[in-house]
Image (spheres, rainbow, N blue to C red):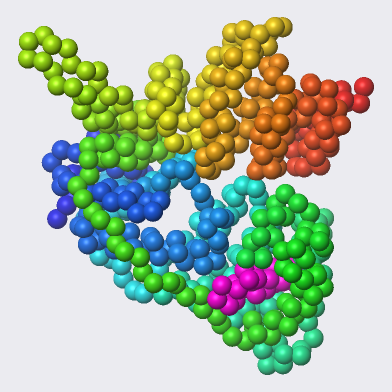
Amino acid sequence: MKTWPRLGIFALALAAFGAEQRPPIELPPLLVSEGASPWRYAAAGDVEVISRSSDDLTLRFLERERLREELARLIVPVEFRPRRSLPRMFVLTGDEASTPRADDRGIRPPTDLQLDDWDVQVRFVALGEASFVGESLAFDRRQLLLSLQRHAPPLPEWLLEGLSVLLADMDFQTAGILMPPLIWISEPVRQRLSAAPDYPRTLLALGELFAPRVPAAKPDPEFNALWRSEAALLCRWALDGKDAPSRAALWKFAGRVGTERPTEALIEECFGMSSSDLRDRLSDYLPVAVKRGMRLPLASAAPSPTLRDATALEIARIQGEWERLAVAYVRARQPELAPQYVAQARDTLRRGVEASTSQERGASGPKGTTSAPRQAPDARISALLGLLELEAGRPVEARPHLEAALHGSVVGPRVLAEVARLRFVEARAKPEGASGLLSAVQANTILAPLATARTQSPPLPLTFLLAAQTLLYSGLPLEPPNLGLLDEGLRFFPQDQSLLFQVALLRASRGDKSEATALVKRGLASELTPANRAAFERLRVSLEK
């Protein structure tokens, strides 16, 4: 049986904590290479895995993850699911039954821990037979809702609330999703409607349902209950029926109202009917929804991926990604342990450099003949080394790695944005343009990686904020490509106060008072920190002069 000492825990080698009782602290394990079973590797769709569990358990785990994603897509179309240019990664280890309890210092390794960065996700799982008991899947409803709440551009409140109501009662199984009858307002009201379909009921006009929610000085419980129930009714009506056009209509409308007003014309365009007709359709569907359950079936199974021994580069890349993310996790909980995790991640990634440069392009001569230059390090390994050093507070050491990653056509919008940020800081310290502005060469050097980041997923606020700041501190004209980049940023992140202010300031600096004033009004109408409100007010006053 595999034991956790094989994995190692940095904390086990450190000084003991106090003797008082406290909840156990879960810290990510140190995944050493020596003296352990070999890593296996598989890739399927947008997933990569390295595993030291058995092939059978690994394949069952990957099939379960595929099922979970397919179940999510029964509710949320693929274009609204989290999109990343980088794959989701898994690190699987042996039988979870061997996981020890917390030691006398209150530290134990996790059995299942997911760590995220802006554009990447890695999950560690200690895999065992107990993970596969029962037909019901341990579907993470909270994670699904969180992904929708983080969608860019933002999704409407009524959609999030309606799906939240439905998700709470859904039964996720390997064959599909089962949904019980809808609770309308309360269980007694549901029962009356179920027994008498003509029982009187009130539905909000769709204009009220779709209107932005404004916190009321005095909450109205009856209105809130009706609004919540009708939001759930609309979502359920759209989901009911195999490949129903109403499902596509719902998501088309939800995607559009993130950046447009929910006008009558938009409702007719998306749903193919007027708002009053749609409300009548929901009223007719309500007695059905409260009386019967519904089922969303899954399609047939997909072929299993192929497992093979992992290469040294694959191990270093995935394990290094996990260990880099573990540093921030540990720093937030036990900061005195973070340097040990940084050192381990650095060692892992350096092994990745060795693995990616070990094959020379020509053989060395026996007597003084010159060998061909070694290959450049893998771009993602360079990127991870750069991010690791940057997060350790060493930007000077990080810069060469990040620039090498960019030169190697790295994938990952955060790396591209960080390169641009370091270039921006350097250029601002030594501007080469007139009147202390950035030169066109400096500005374009910053904007180039941002233009590439714009083509990758997910979109990041930093990408658009840096673009606005670069244009503000340079003399570059606001040509259509740059304006398009800024407009896209405001569409993706309409509530980002820093981005909104920077774009307003940029517009004002170029003499576009009307657009700047509109952006300032938009900012002042939102919830602002006192400091940000003061900044917007100062800009408003200057525009009125």
Above or below residue 181? Residue 380 is above
When the figure is inspected, residue 433 is found, relative to residue 406, above or below; the finding is above
Depth order, front residue of 497/87: 87
Question: Quick one: quadrant of the C terminus?
Answer: top right
Residue 347 lies in what quarter of the image?
A: top left
Give the farthest residue toward the right: 545
Q: Nearer the viewer, residue 19 or 36?
A: 36
In the image, 403: left or right of 515? left
Q: From this viewpoint, is residue 455 visible?
A: yes
In the rendering, at what x and y percent does residue 198 appear? 76, 90
Q: Pinpoint residue 46: horizontal percent, then vertical percent.
A: 40, 51
Q: Which residues are the magenta region?
A: 220-247
Rendered location of residue 415, percent (x, y): 47, 31
Whether residue 237 is in magenta: the answer is yes
Residue 88 drawn at (x, y percent):
40, 48
Which residue is depicted at the point 40% across and 38% down? Answer: 325
- Give yes or no for residue 338 being in the magenta stretch: no
Foreground: 262 or 183?
262
Q: Residue at x 74, y 78 (%)?
A: 281
